Amino acid sequence: MQITVIGCGYVGLVTATCFAEMGNRVSCVDTSTQRINALQRGEAPIFEPGIEALITTNLRAGRLAFSTDTAGACSRAEVIFIAVGTPSAADGSADISQIVAVASELGRTLDQPAIVVCKSTAPVGTACRVQSVLDHQCQRRQVAWQHRVVSNPEFLKEGAAIDDFMRPDRVVLGTDDADAERVMRALYEPFVRNHDRILCMSRRAAEMTKYAANTFLATRISFINEIASLCEQLGVDVEEVRKGIGSDQRIGHHFIYAGCGYGGSCFPKDIRAMLQMAAQYDMPMPILHSVEARNQQQKTWPLRMLKRELGNLHGRTLAIWGLAFKPGTDDIRDAPSLVLLDALLAGGSSVQAFDPAASDNIAQRYPEAVKEGQLKLLQDPYAALNNADALVLLTEWKQFRQPDFHLVAQRLRTPLVIDGRNQYDPQTMASLGLRHVGVGRQVAPPAAPVLREVV
Ligand code: UDX
């Protein structure tokens, strides 16, 4: 099939390369000449394991092409994916102006009917808006055909995006046009083992599915983090509770890991966008408000633990392992590391940090602290520990799972490990003389409850 993908960002590139890999001919368009030039050389502007190999193979095979010319790239396309950004506006709503601008350009320039697919995460009603923009242009140009707009949200996890695209749990297609559905089903057929995985629904339901999925996952995380906080007070290990509840099939094991809060480009942004959609209808959403508030609070957990263990942090040196919002990415958007770094640097602590991928992004965010040596970004995880008063683990990169604990104990000035992702076994740590503080894993006996007078 002849496909065009508009937007060479994260979602657009993964979509384009995976469709090309399945044998389609894919043109990929972006307004940034710099980005397109790099892509033509096979260089990916995003950090995603496996993406450069896919780009190179498909460029060489002639199935993938990059350009800045939208009209030219769309001239023979049967299906056009819109995968441009929908950043948060000042009020938290998703800004769909880039989608509308692309729709308008397509309406003005397309000389053949196409299936236009909204891939970007966008509020309910966006696909209908794109349809009316296209219809309006068709009427103005007095052409005899109509474009058909489909909503097809992505469910890609950063760091595992190619695998998620190649082996999706489900493909959601929002359309009530039988022909568009047939074409889209044919396009996705090679990616799904059986047709049950392709779910066809209304455009609005498809858009809502994306928001509901992400906000539900965020809710699970804030829920377990809240349970973890109570576990800390009650002297209960939340890891035992996690296993205890996860084995109930109705609950399951995914997304119930307590930690120092979720970050990334999706969960925080999608919750804010959902709350804005609700606000337009004067609809309170107390659950989602709490999910967001709980997450903000959870991101302060590492700092609270450091203060509890060390007292005043001014003048102290702290080691951090992991700065990205999760393993497998260099993305630091809304990462818990930012909350900790902001506080430590403002409070006069020195930080020695290591991350396998995100250091450059952190250096760009804190140029002054790096220049003054208050924030050292190191190439070796153990070098970050030298004379530090504590090690704080924020991102569970695989290489941090089984470190040389003897070396950790040797290098730290104070044998304290704040384990923000519950990666380490408290008993093992204790046997090595390391004080371990996990999320919802109190080592001390339970504290006495605050007794209130019963009236
Ligand atoms: C998410 C969705 O999973 C994906 O389907 C959607 O398309 C985009 O948003 P992503 O943001 O890449 O993907 O990250 P994900 O792996 O889902 O993790 C999100 C955050 O939740 C991370 O900060 C992670 O550390 C945190 N998390 C995840 C927990 O704290 N506990 C868990 O149990 C799971």
Image (cartoon, rainbow, N blue to C red):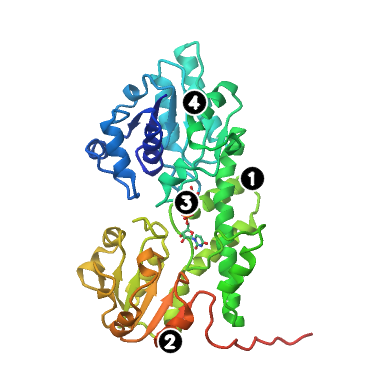
Are the residues flagged by discs 3 and 2 in contact, CB closer than 8 Å? Answer: no
Taking the image as shown, residue 222 lies to the left or right of residue 43, namely right
Disc 3/disc 1 C-alpha distance (Å): 23 Å
Of callouts 3 and 1, the N-terminal one: 3
Question: Is label 4 or label 3 in front?
Answer: 3
Question: Is label 1 or label 4 in front?
Answer: 4
Mark sitting on residue 133: 4
Q: Which residue is mark 1?
A: 281
Which amino acid type is shown beneath numbered disc 1?
Answer: Tyr
Quarter of the image for residue 21 reads top left
Q: For the N terminus, which image quadrant?
A: top left
Of callouts 1 and 2, the N-terminal one: 1
Question: Is label 4 or label 2 in front?
Answer: 2
Of callouts 3 and 2, the N-terminal one: 3
Of callouts 4 and 3, the N-terminal one: 4
Q: Which residue is mark 3?
A: 266
SS for tag 2?
helix
Q: Is residue 259 above or below residue 42?
A: below
Judge by depth and name the residue closer to the eye, 424 or 342. Answer: 424
